[in-house]
Image: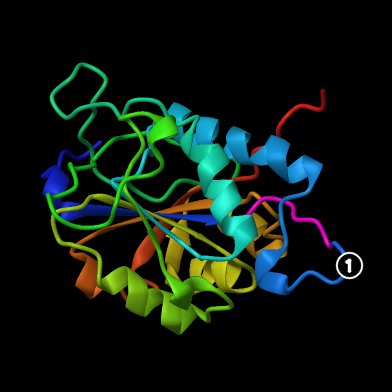
Amino acid sequence: MQEVDEADVRWLVLLRHAKSAWPDGVDDQERPLAPRGRRDAPAAGRWLRDVGRVPDLAICSPARRTRETWELAARELGPAVPPGSPEHVVGGLGPAVPPGSPEPAAEEFGAAAPPGSPEPAAEEFGAAAPPVSYEPRLYAATAPALIDVVRETPAALGTLLLIGHNPGMQELTLRLAGDAVGDALERAEAKFPTSAIAVLAWHGTWSQLAPGRARLVRFAVPRGAKR
């Protein structure tokens, strides 16, 4: 795998909120997670931790179901792998991989968030939880609107997580992915269910993000076990 300067790679992680409930008389923005969603959201956090995609910053829609998804996922992220440790692998995005091939090993290119900006997640999630910003533009956002949000990411950050809604999350994935690992793009196009996660990467800066520029490295739908 071709080695690159870790500052040259940006990772964008898109998480659709977990399964929500539809209580009578409740405004759409106030709909809570359903029991299945409360199982799946922590599974999404564990998946991000296990593949080394703990974000430097999370930007979340202010809707209740997205906020609850983030809160439950954040508790499972655990400590990020620090650059320079034996687990920290610096690598390139690699050549195209034929459909059906196994996904590449996770690499961590994250950088620490600069002092100053979005407030950290709630205290009970522990010191390891990344900062989160609740951004009204993510609610019912179109793909172009989401790209505008992503382009505003501080240059020092390596990995950004967006927690939002469909169809925006699916549309953004399909618009940004110029190619993909294995059948990830086909699966994301066929269905982007609740708790789905798309991981995109590209060489360049956040402000340079444009349609077709990124590679869809992973697509997963973590599910929590029924108790």
Residue 53, percent across and down? 38, 39
Q: Could you tell me which secondary element the residue under label 1 belongs to?
A: loop
* Stretch in magenta: 16-22
For this rendering, which residue is in front, 6 or 83? 83
Residue 103, percent across and down? 49, 37
> Can residue 72 be found in the magenta stretch?
no
Q: Is residue 30 above or below residue 119?
A: below
Query: Is residue 20 shown to the viewer in this render?
Result: yes
Residue 28, percent across and down? 72, 72
Give the residue displayed 79% in from the left and 41% down from the top: 35
Q: Quadrant of the C terminus?
A: top right
- Total numbered labels: 1
For this rendering, which residue is in front, 211 or 142? 142
Residue on which disc 1 sits: 24
Give the residue displayed 38% in from the left and 44% down from the top: 121
Mark 1 burial class by Cα count in 10 Å: few <14, some 14-19, many 20+: few
> Can residue 19 be found in the magenta stretch?
yes
Residue 73, percent across and down? 53, 39
